[in-house]
Amino acid sequence: MKIAILTSGGDSAGMNAVVRAVVKVGILKGCETWVVREGYEGLVRGNTEALSEQSLDEEPVDLPDNTSPDGTSFNLIHNLRFGDGDLLKDGTGDHPGTRSLKGRYIVRVGFDDVRAWFAEGGTLIGTARSKTFRTPEGRLQAAYNMIKEGLDALVVCGGDGSLTGADVFRAEWPKLVEALQSEGRITAEKAKLHAHLRIVGLVGSIDNDMSMTDLTIGAPTALHRICEAIDNINSTATSHSRAFVLEVMGRHCGWLALLAGVSGGADFIFIPERPPTSESWEDEMCECIHRHREVGKRKTIVIVAEGATDRDLNPIKADHVKDVLTERLGLDTRVTTLGHTQRGGRPCAYDRVLPTLQGMEAVETLLEATPTSPSYMIGIQENKITRVPLMEAVAMTRAVSAAIEAKDFEKAMSYRDPEFKE
Ligand code: ADP
């Protein structure tokens, strides 16, 4: 089997560990492993140029022994540069001792190419949002590029949009192959060989917003970043007896805000799934914080998820919360928006362990896939790595957002936690 892996949508810590795990386990299971740069966009663009070696003659490269544990050498592209220049514009540039990736978006990789990738933030193979992949023509070209390279399996690591794209691609695959054959772009033999596409999805999302899994790749690191930020803020808040309002990520999911509140010690938390229950959230928050101050607390921390609203879906914004705390409680209040500092940086230990275990499961899933089995998403539930039908998880995730938009917060909470009670 020839497996390709891509990362798509918003980046998250742990995506590189996914690539590393899939490549290493894939090779150990006897597969060929490839990466697709720049998400689906790379799949559409494919390879227009042969692997350039011109820059190799500048300096001889001492290639390390790059054999896999079974003694076979797989490392075809050692010293390729991932991540330099504006890859979407093909601006990889030439680097002494490296081969240029210009015009090549689908690249075979070996053990050495992904060595130690678990410690790197973001995604080294790039991610993008691809408009062309949303079109049938784009997906036809993507199918052609995959078949041209002989690829028959795809691992996608991204959010619910990316996983939907993977499912659409797989469902459409037989039609795409037929079209390519009738256009004379592939032979009947190739069409037969590539009659089905194996796909599997892994969830890379810092918000932990996917249903049917307890945790998504990147969420533990983002939580860790927020927790550190609160620790830092706590020092100054306590020293000056100040209030701080922190805005954290999470458009339809309050996981980061909630868990940051628990791990950092917040006084009040606003999340999208469960807006304050009283008529006036201002009253509710002020009463609570006043009580905390009365018992001697010197600092106040309020956490606002970016998608937090009141029960009428009016956004609750950090600046407004600050004004309320200043005017009604007379607190010296500051706002801190953590923004992209939550997303990046070195993955925490769990964002190395989870993608490694899930990457292993992804390869197993591909090897066991049949034309009739559903497309699976790899998750984790109650500390066990799981396989769940990908579109069920996506549908459930979208149902939570729909329930929030319909102001049915009880339903949204029941989707998040079936045992939840007010
Ligand atoms: P995320 O994966 O983080 O939710 P997006 O929703 O932006 O991010 O999706 C990432 C990419 O996945 C899109 O740019 C597009 O190329 C692809 N994609 C998303 N939805 C679909 C779809 N319904 N059909 C085909 N491709 C899709």
Image: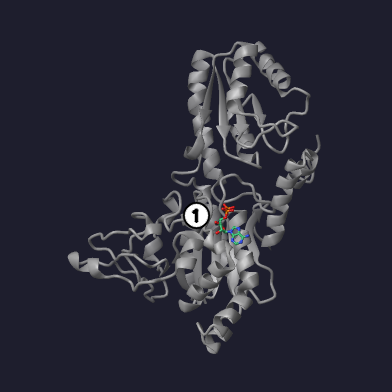
Asked whether 379 or 350 is in front, the reply is 379
- Give the quadrant of residue 38: bottom left
How has the structure been colored for display?
A: one colour
The residue at the point 76 percent across, 47 percent down is 415
**Residue 184 versus residue 9 in the image, above or below:** below
Asked whether 153 or 70 is in front, the reply is 153
Specify the amino acid type for callout 1.
Met
The image position of residue 270, as x and y in percent, is 66, 31
The image position of residue 353, as x and y in percent, is 52, 53
Question: Visible in this render: residue 157?
Answer: yes
Q: How many marks?
A: 1
413 to the left or right of 38: right
**Residue 127 versus residue 317 in the image, above or below:** below
Looking at this view, name the residue that lies furthest to the bottom: 189
Asked whether 74 or 99 is in front, the reply is 99
**Residue 192 versus residue 149 in the image, above or below:** below
Q: Which quarter of the rendered picture does the C terminus lie within?
A: top right
The residue at the point 39 percent across, 71 percent down is 48
- Give the quadrant of residue 65: bottom left
The image position of residue 74, as x and y in percent, is 38, 73
The residue at the point 42 percent across, 55 percent down is 124
Question: Visible in this render: residue 25?
Answer: no
Where does ligand 1 appear, by image quarter? bottom right
The residue at the point 46 percent across, 64 percent down is 42
Residue that label 1 marks = 15
